[in-house]
Amino acid sequence: MRFHCTNILAAGVIASAAFGGGNPSEPVVPGELILRADTSAALTTALAALDVDFSNIAVIDQIDGRPIYLISYGLTAAQTPGDVSAVIDDLIAAGTIPWGELNYIGQTGEGKTDSLWLSGVGFGAQTFANQYAVPLLGVELAHKRSRGAGVVVAVIDTGIDPMHPALGGRVSPAGASFVVGSATSNDIGDGIDNDGDGLIDEQVGHGTFVAGLVHLVAPEATILPVRVLDSDGNAGTYQIARALAWAIDRGAHIANMSLGETYRSQALEDVVGEAETRGVAVFGAAGNSNIDDPREFPACDGAATGVSALDWFDIKASFSNFGDRIDLAAPGDTRVVKGQPDPSKSIVGPLPGGGYGAWKGTSFATAFVSGTAALVRAQHPEWPSAAVPANLIRATLATTLGSTGIAIDAANPSYAGLLGQSRISAIGAVDAGPLAPPLGDLDLDGDVTAADLSLLLEAWGPAAPGTRADLDASGDVGASDLSLLLYGW
């Protein structure tokens, strides 16, 4: 496969006045809108108002535990989605609902620019383990202080191949799929050109690749697969927000969101804000269009941490978005010569089926940041605490990574202050904190002993989200967790 640089032209773009504004470049999902109704009476009133002008008004879905609804609508030949936005605006002005919006499409940055993974000579487990980002970030040195044990990283993406050897058996069996018509969280194709760009299943492997980079940096963290993007890398805003809400409820500490949209969705902003309040750190990719406007969300959301991409010399990757809302930078570029990736200057990751490839994009820079954040989060199992309450965990992680990283403004004078506070350093970040408890250290005394075995046996059975004895984040403390504890003894 080859890196493609043709942008997808989005049809049917409507700038909703309800909240988003800006200049969204994504299409809307036909016949779907999202609204928040805090009471059943408000929902009934909103549906009745929509029913006056449009057909097929019905509640399709609701985000569990939140008053956020997905609503269907039908249009006549003379109507447009803009007419729906106008009615939503009237409902907001009347105080019936706090917000409402059309359901826009979110996508991987690589899908937007048709960037595909590249195969090449010499790409295997060794190339993956020794890629340039590893020494650049000081990953191996960082592992002497933390390996991410006890941290759950939700990879909200195209799914994950859990059997890939590069993932070390650290993929939770308790993943979920929010792709319509598919219940598996595996990273698989559907054989359909979903986005009409002439390519079929072009983003298959994206989630596995991202998960591999997170695991490379934080090998003892648990990866929670949350499949929401189809095999072309697309999903509706509602589905993305619902997937993040699910990850929050399942005890994720970190949510890697190597995806985005230029529409500023209130649905997604609500859930990202909830994530921050509940101590879940969201990391988002800045995007691959080499622009600062329109911004990508959730990367530029104030409750998330946005990530730009650099090359092996800490120079801005030519494709990386930038801007004053970007927080951190990380390696994300690959050098391609005559159509072939240079193994010494490539971002290398696992692909479904056991293979490896090279890719480039802010998605992969984001994965390195999420992995590094997992190392730091593992050093602080006491969080939330009086010193760092839940609503400050994300900001504390971002500040730690930013303040311990490598300065990049001098090397990028045209983008000073627009690529993030620094290029992250895994060794620098963990040096700022204590030694992390090892995997299976349930009493947090620094060793895995009989006392930890006793605690695991006491917790045997169904486990609440975030239970430390649930070492594989499966939602159940059982034989698999026992095996992992004994491994760390």
Image (cartoon, helix red, strand yellow):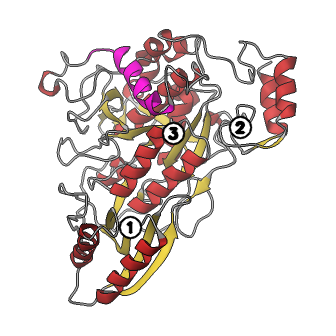
Magenta: predominant secondary structure element?
A: helix
Q: Nearer the viewer, residue 192 or 309?
A: 309
At numbered mark 1, what does the secondary structure look like: helix, strand or loop?
Answer: strand
For disc 2, the neighbor class at 10 Å (few under 14, some 14 to 19, many from 20) is: many
Closer mark to the observer between disc 3 and disc 2? 3
Q: What's the residue type where badge 2 is placed?
A: Asp
Q: Which residue is mark 3?
A: 278
Q: What's the residue type where badge 3 is placed?
A: Arg
Q: What's the residue type where badge 1 is placed?
A: Ile
Q: Is residue 230 left or right of residue 418?
A: right
Tell me the quarter of the picture where residue 419 sits. top left
For disc 1, the neighbor class at 10 Å (few under 14, some 14 to 19, many from 20) is: many
At numbered mark 3, what does the secondary structure look like: helix, strand or loop?
Answer: loop
Q: Is residue 360 visible?
A: no
Numbered badge on residue 472: 2
Q: Nearer the viewer, residue 396 or 305?
A: 396
Q: Which residue is mark 1?
A: 34
Alpha carbons under labels 3 and 2: distance apart:
21 Å
Residues at discs 3 and 2 in contact (Cβ within 8 Å): no
Q: Position of residue 243 (x, y in %)?
A: 51, 54
At numbered mark 2, what does the secondary structure look like: helix, strand or loop?
Answer: loop
Q: What residue range appears in magenta? A: 390-407
The correct choice, above or below, for 206 with respect to 431 in the image is: below
Q: Is residue 337 visible?
A: yes
Numbered badge on residue 155: none
Q: Position of residue 486 (x, y in %)?
A: 83, 24
Q: Is residue 80 left or right of residue 394?
A: left
